[in-house]
Image: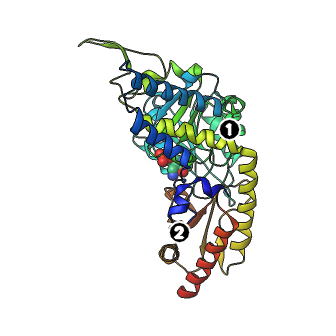
Amino acid sequence: MFKEDFPYFKNSEITYLDNAATTQKPKSVINAEMDYYENYCANTHRSSFGDANKATLNYENARVSLQKFINAPKKEEIIFTKGVTESINFIANSFAKKFEKVIISSLEHHSNITPWHMQGRSLSKGLEVVSCNENLDFDFRDYENILKENPNSFVSITHISNAFGKIHDIKAIIQLAHKYNSVVMIDAAQSLAHMSVDVQDLDVDFFAMSGHKTFGPTGVGAIYIKEIFLKEVDTYQTGGATINEVDFDSSTLLDSPYKFEAGTQNIAGVIGFAKALDYLSNIGYEKIEKQELILYEYLDEQLSKLPNIKFYNTIENSIGSRSFNFKNISHDDIGILVDKMKVALRVGHHCAQPIMKQLNIKGTIRVSLAFYNTKEDIDKLIKALKKALKMLA
Ligand code: PMP
């Protein structure tokens, strides 16, 4: 029923089950981007003619849309970026640089690991990793021990694992970090497609979001920065539109958010991102969460009937992605065969090599759902997997 809103499903015969990689875009998002390019394409915050004013207004309205969507107190706390990767790199290379210790978890995406390596951090120097148990649950005891030994740290943790769909209890993670005077950034790349978020209720300090994983355009995302930190966060790039006054010896910067948004921004992308949020608001998370739970349980039930399947976590406290392997069968071979049967999923390490190494595997077969998927999609997947297994037997 929801698929009708998405042109991709009219134009493609693919059974799309790779939503953790990127989501499809509703017509309203595509139209909003096209409308900008076709009807009022102009730069923002610079010129003062009609179309430029309209572009600026829509861009700034998009900021307010995102502010309201995550219940941020102020629009100045919302900074647009290219996506979660840029959001994390920005904070890593500015604010978080000053911290002696950065704490991550073993379930992180490479985007929340490699920026810390770029600063020369490693397990023996400046980086601590919270372990997870055999069901991939975050180990709170280990976490508290690390915090006790390293108060005043910078904690950077993913909300939902893209590789396994595991949901971290980020409210508890944030509370505990604050108890030990630490600051928390959440990688929310996988969050808004599946659940609503209230940054005030979470009391989160930095919250990194992705447009393309939230039914919005590619190349756009954002970071929420709690107001008390806005003055402490340095810019890590500057240029056009960030400054107040410049001469050849020095320059002064504008206030947030402008000082952080250097150069011409992804204007159409930002406007499209806001349209995606409108689209989600119109459906409502209650409906989305209910539909996803039905699909997720059905997926697990149907997959569990396949011979020699191995999961790495139960479905409790998980959503979106389900990862598995078949005994003595290469995940790559499954990927090649189901692609020929027009089923789109991802096989491999899912940009989470450290946890794959910990599990002693090269990768998994990952099926990742969105609310627009249907039980028929899952039936098609199961049929394709059965056929592939037969061919590989
Ligand atoms: N973190 C997680 C958990 C992700 O799933 C992804 C995307 N696969 C990223 C970070 C990177 O996000 P983006 O594509 O917005 O840079």
Element under disc 1: loop
Residue at (38%, 33%) from the top-left corner? 41
Foreground of the two, 112 or 342: 342
Residue at (49%, 56%) from the top-left corner? 351
Could you say which quadrant of the image residue 171 lies in? top right
Labels 2, 1: front one: 2
Determine whether, in the image, residue 118 is placed left or right of residue 345: left
Q: Is mark 2 within 8 Å of ligand 1?
A: no
Of the 4 image quadrants, the one containing the C terminus is bottom right
Q: Is mark 1 within 8 Å of ligand 1?
A: no
Q: CA distance from mark 2 to mark 1?
A: 33 Å
Foreground of the two, 27 or 324: 27
**Above or below: residue 188 compared with residue 5:** above
Of the 4 image quadrants, the one containing the N terminus is bottom right
User: Which sits earlier in the primary sequence, circle 2 or circle 1?
Assistant: 2
The percent coordinates of residue 322 (x first, y second) are: 64, 63
The percent coordinates of residue 19 (x first, y second) are: 57, 57
The percent coordinates of residue 355 (x first, y second) are: 55, 58
Q: How is the image coloured?
A: rainbow
Foreground of the two, 26 or 39: 39
Toward the left, the furthest residue is 248
The answer to whether residue 317 of the structure is visible from this angle is yes
Determine whether, in the image, residue 360 is placed left or right of residue 241: right
Q: Which mark identifies residue 197?
A: 1
Q: Which mark identifies residue 13?
A: 2
Element under disc 2: loop
**Above or below: residue 175 compared with residue 49:** below
Q: Amino acid at mark 2?
A: Glu
Label 2: few (<14), some (14–19) or many (≥20) C-alpha neighbours in 10 Å: few
The percent coordinates of residue 70 (x first, y second) are: 64, 33
Q: Amino acid at mark 1?
A: Val
